[in-house]
Amino acid sequence: MTNRKIEYWVIPPEGDAEFFAGMEAVLDLYEKPYDTRFPVEAMDEQPLQLLKET
């Protein structure tokens, strides 16, 4: 079971360049100064609403 989980989250070598280019684009976006005309929204990968911090 552990191996399956590791395989699921490991980025295959052939996808490394594309993944890192996409990550850099996101980080560049977050680095820009705040602009009220064009707010940046982030989405979590899990469809959960956190009601309290535990």
Image (cartoon, grey):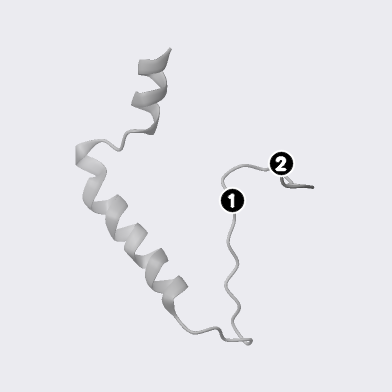
Q: Residue furthest right?
A: 51
**Residue at image x 60%, y 67%?**
41
Q: Residues within 10 Å of mark 1 (few under 14, many from 20)?
A: few
Q: Residues within 10 Å of mark 2 (few under 14, many from 20)?
A: few
Instruction: From the top left corner, tell me how far across and down residue 1 is, in percent.
Output: 43, 12
Marked residue nearer the N-terminal end (2 or 1): 1
Question: Residue 21, relative to residue 1: is it above or below?
Answer: below
Q: Which residue is denoted by mark 1 in the rendering?
A: 44
Instruction: From the top left corner, tell me how far across and down residue 45 is, in percent.
Output: 56, 45
**Residue at image x 55%, y 83%?**
34
- 43 on left or right of 33: right
Q: CA distance from mark 2 to mark 1?
A: 18 Å
- 45 on left or right of 52: left
Q: Which residue is denoted by mark 2 in the rendering?
A: 54
Quadrant containing the C terminus in the rendered view: top right
Instruction: From the top left corner, tell me how far across and down residue 5 is, in percent.
Output: 42, 23
- Report helix, strand or loop for mark 1: loop
Q: Nearer the viewer, residue 51 or 38?
A: 51
Q: Picture quarter containing residue 9? A: top left
Question: Residue 49, relative to residue 39: is it above or below?
Answer: above
- Report helix, strand or loop for mark 2: loop
Q: Nearer the viewer, mark 2 or mark 1?
A: 2
**Residue at image x 34%, y 58%?**
22
Instruction: From the top left corner, tell me how far across and down residue 43 is, in percent.
Output: 59, 56
Q: Residue furthest top?
A: 1
Q: Residue furthest front?
A: 54
Name the amino acid, label 2. Thr
Number of labels in the image equals 2
Name the amino acid, label 1. Asp
**Residue at image x 73%, y 47%?**
50
